[in-house]
Structures are given as C-alpha cells and as structure tokens.
Image: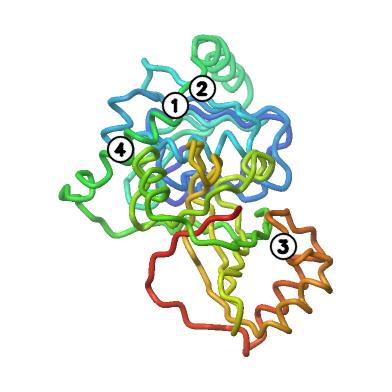
Amino acid sequence: MVSFLACKELYEMIQQKSQEAKEVLWVCSANLGLDAHKVFSQNLLKNPPADMRFVFKVTDFATKRGEVNPYEIQYLMEHFNNNVKSHDNFQSSIYIFDNSAVITSANLTKPAFENSVETGVLLDGPQFEEVKNFFSQSLWESSKTIKDLQKLKKMWNMAEKSRKTENLIKTKPHTQIKDWTDDYVNRWYFTIPDPLSKKIEHKIRKEKIWPINFSVIADVGPSCFKNVKLGDLAYLVNLKKQRGKIEVELARILDKGIVETDEGDSHFAYRTEKTYLMERNQFYEMLKNATIAPKTWGTQLNESQLKLLTETLSLPKTRKKRKSKNKSKTKK
C-alpha cells in the first residue's frame, strides 16, 4: 500500500512509526540539524529498536555550511549504540520502521518538519522490501565510519558565528515539533571545591573552540567523562565558600572533550538551567538522606536519590532567580 503524506501528516507519521518500532529504525538524510532526534518519538530512549542505523552526508563542506551538525551526530552515537555512518554521494531521505518505509523530501532537521512544505510517501508490502534492500546494500554497506568527530565540532564552532549573520527567510510554522522531556535523561551530582584558573579555562576553550556562552567544568575524571552523555543533567554544587548558603546549579551537558592541563584532562561544557541557594545545614542533611558523601566528585544519581534532591531543591525557600552570568568551575 502507498499513502501520500505532506507537512503535519508527514511529521505525525514519523512520530507514530518511531513510537511503534521494535526491531528496525534506519534513517538516511543528507542534512542533519540540531535536536533533530526530537522529530522521532521519545519512546526511542526508553525502548530503542533492536537495529538502529543512521547515514548522513558528513563532509567538511557540509559541516562548515551548517548542513550536518556534529553535536547531533554525537547525541545519536551516545544514545543509540554508535550506529552512525557517513556517505558522501547521496541525496535521499528515507525513514525505515519495522515493516514500512517513508520516502520523503524532508531531511532530518526540525525546520524541515516544522516550516518547509515537505511531502513523502509511506510504503509497505513488497515495495517496502525493495526500499530496505536499497538502504542495506546501496547505502549502509558503502558508508564509512565517522572517525574524527572532534575535528568536525571544531569546524562547526569556528563557522557558527558567520552562519548566524546570514539572512535567513523565516516562515510561519505549520507543525509544532513536540519537545522531549527529561524523563529518561541521566542525572549526575558533582561537587566543585575550587575555581578554574583563567589560564586553564582559556586553554580548554581555545583547544575545543567552545563559545563564551558555554560554561566549563574541568577534571571530572575518566569514569564520569566516559559515561556522561550529551543532554544529561547534572547538579553542580559550589563548595568554594566556607560560610553562608550553598549554591546548587542544575546544568545541561552540551559537550565534552579531552584537553591535557595541570588541573585535569577530562572536561565538560554546560549551560545552567536553574540555580538554587540552600542553607548549609539543609544541604548536608539532604546529602545524608540521599547517602551521598559531602565531597563526592561525581556520581550518577539513582531513582531514589534523584527524587529526594528534586523534592528538596523544589522547596520555595531553596529557589533563587537566575541572573545572566557566565561561570567556569573545576573539580580536583
């Protein structure tokens, strides 16, 4: 059977099929945008299909032009078993789910599904097998492993400023892409006993080409560095002051990188989403109840620990209005 899809229908079909997929989710797209994973159902994080494959046109030129976002590649790699490859010579956009396929003009970007007038067809039955064989034999087998993601991220960051100055045509959205919640996002706890020196901060930023609006946490240790994923949330606890209230930041991990410094080699870039101020006795009582040692460098929170910290920090007396201020911190 063949069904014609356009605009909102196209997005809703991708949502439905990715929600239902249990065995197969294969995607090829020449372009890949930031947060493009949100085009799919968030059920992928909780119940990912057994066989997930992504193919994009990953080239230096495409990265500099802003056509393929390396941070989105990293997100897909970290969350979906590293099954992401590059093919330099295709323009197709194909989305395959279990026993059906969508062939469409829509690249895997949020603007394509929100703003552009995109069309496609849904195929199942005998036609589906032809599409699946094409993907497997003509695309996947001839695709290459993406080896130097760090180089691509540097290219992206260097070109980002000039891309923002381009005059982009804005159109009224015809579809609202559902934002993903943090229900299935890992949460972490880090203590920050010492400030990051300006010299070390400058070295990290220069090496990773991190923009000024990315805050830095350094020396997180190899274990946490390996297991933290882009998009994870972390409670960063500032213990620099020996007196007064304690500051707790809820931070979103935006990037991570290795840079050799005198203050550690494993570093994160993050954005603060909320800031809390707590009385010292209240803070240490919270840690005690959550069985977290006061000087814990970094640990992933389990369900009960997360519930306790969330409930305690949400109390009206601990909430603080965030000021627009860039902060850089480290742990030793």
Count neighbours of disc 2 (C-alpha within 10 A) and say few if under 14, some if 14 to 19, many if 20 or more.
Answer: many
Residue sitting at 34 percent across and 58 percent down?
173
Residue 164 in the image: x percent, y percent? 23, 50
Q: CA distance from mark 1 to mark 2?
A: 7 Å
Count neighbours of disc 3 (C-alpha within 10 A) and say few if under 14, some if 14 to 19, many if 20 or more.
Answer: few
**Is the residue under label 4 in contact with that under label 1 (CB below 8 Å)?**
no
Residue 56 got which mark? 1
Q: Earlier in the sequence, mark 1 or mark 2?
A: 1
Q: CA distance from mark 3 to mark 2?
A: 41 Å
The residue beneath circle 3 is: 295
Quadrant assignment, res 285: bottom right
**Is the residue under label 2 in contact with that under label 1 (CB below 8 Å)?**
yes
Residue 324 in the image: x percent, y percent? 37, 73
> Residue 75, relative to residue 317: is it above or below?
above
Looking at the image, can residue 123 be seen? no
The residue beneath circle 4 is: 66
Q: Earlier in the sequence, mark 4 or mark 2?
A: 4
